[in-house]
Image (cartoon, rainbow, N blue to C red):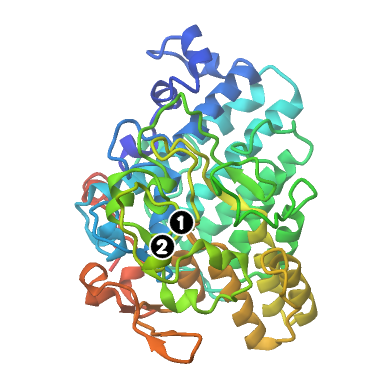
Amino acid sequence: MKNYIISLSLLLSLALCTSCASGFLETYSTQGVDEGNVFKTTESAMTALEGTHKLMYYNGDQSQNYMGYETMLVMGDLMGEDLLFGGSTSLFMQSYNWTVHRTITSAMMNYCYKFHYNIVANVNVIIENIDNAAGSQDERDYIKGQALGLRAAMYFNLVRMWSKRYEAGQANTQLGVPLVLDTETSKTPQPRATVEDVYQAINDDLDQAISLLGSATKRSTKMHLNQSVANGLKSRVALTQGQWEEAARYARAARTTDYALSPTIFTETPSRFCDQSNTEWMWGTKRIKAEDEGFSSLQVFFGNTDAVTSRNGPKCIYNSLYHRISDTDKRKGMFAATAAIANSEAFVPPSPTTKLPAYYNNKYMVPDHSSPQVDCPYMRVSEMYLIEAEAAARLGRDADAQQTLYELIVTRDPQYTKSVQTGPALLDEILLHRRIELWGEGFRFFDLKRMGDPLVRDKPAILPDGKTENSNHNIAWATAATMQIPADDPRWQFLFSDDELNNNPHIIQND
């Protein structure tokens, strides 16, 4: 692996993040500062960690679709079937039609790869140095636990994007991604570790993070990781590995009394899914409006901001999915069944002149169309209910799965009654609610891949009167090649960029 990618100095991140780390930068020069000063105390080490947190969404005056972790969330849904373009626009269209991640000269693909390893490089320095920082043990544990959790989250993304899926019960010797777990390793190019080895490293980090964050300092913002977030990450990983008992256990541990399901989360106006103070949010960004990042956030692409990409390319729900949502379900109200409804007073357009299509979404409603400096959810407690319910169903514990699902869905649909389905039918019901609940939050591509399901975008919608309606995916933008993609197709793996191939002789390219 190219040394530039994985050994970026922690101080480079701090130099990029002047607004979030100004306290440190006013004290020390950004040139030639040694790590001994950065980690002299837990206070200065926390400033370094804050800089890394900001890198999770920092744009740095690049193209507006270069927005850190939120870029991966946008791609994660545009590469599925449930979210689609309702108009033609350039940004992210190549993700929607599955070309950008298969183009080795793509700047976007190169950015996605470097983003993850940049975060890894930063947290590696923190992990190696924090134990000797002056301060309380709680503070050291809090910083180190977060760094380990972030590293696990980055590798979890990397291995799911650049590798074949994990198969439970198999050796999983298929090639994963390079493992760089210390600054010494970063000095030389590394080969691809196996998928099993990458997942082992992820789980080791999360186990340590859960332990360290158990008695650590209470966090001041949901941008920080705490023990419940680490448990949530562990449940995601276990679900992907088909370790159902662990997935259920960690999901239940994650949904502590710090969080509460909100009956109004899908109906709040004038803004929703833009504020981490919501009781359901476990982890997410906390943007400061004064730190203007321009039109660069998930809400710019999926919401109703006054940006060209929002006006020209409004995002819609797959009509086949929309018509499976109960009429009494509050989540259905986020979508317009017809263009007339989309352009009525019931919906808030990106601008007064925007003409919206049928099935337009208003999930990410911003309070100020001219300023998308709003928070973005990385993890919500409802996901934990869904993980626990799915895992229980796969274990054959139908009663547990029914009850867990009921506790969540009754807050979305007051007329919902506890499911009487069992076996595969119950699992299908849970997975349907997962698609509805987490729509637009970055999960669908990864869910299809972990379950070994094909991508199907041309399934007709079944209307209330029993008639059918053709898929609302526009073949001119999706292209015929992505209307159906088999589960075993090589396109489920991202290709390594020419930059990585040119600088790391050990990299073996994907098919």
Q: Nearer the viewer, residue 503 or 474?
A: 474
In this picture, residue 235 sits left or right of residue 352: right
In this picture, residue 256 sits left or right of residue 102: right
Q: Quadrant of the C terminus?
A: bottom left
The residue positioned 63% from the left and 16% from the top of the image is: 41
Name the amino acid, label 2. Ala
Instruction: From the image, tell me which residue sits under label 2.
Output: 342
Could you tell me which secondary element the residue under label 1 belongs to? loop
Label 1 environment density (alpha carbons within 10 Å; few <14, some 14–19, many ≥20): some
In this picture, residue 89 sits left or right of residue 177: left
The residue positioned 25% from the left and 59% from the top of the image is: 94
Q: Quadrant of the N terminus?
A: top left
Q: Nearer the viewer, residue 170 or 303?
A: 303
Q: Nearer the viewer, residue 3 or 477?
A: 477
The residue positioned 68% from the left and 30% from the top of the image is: 220
Name the amino acid, label 1. Phe
Figure check: 428 above or below 73: below
Q: Position of residue 234 (x, y in %)?
A: 64, 56
Q: Earlier in the sequence, mark 2 or mark 1?
A: 2
Q: Nearer the viewer, residue 335 or 226?
A: 335
Instruction: From the image, tell me which residue sits under label 1.
Output: 347
Q: Position of residue 228 (x, y in %)?
A: 71, 48
CB within 8 Å, label 2 to label 1: yes
In this picture, residue 166 sits left or right of residue 140: left
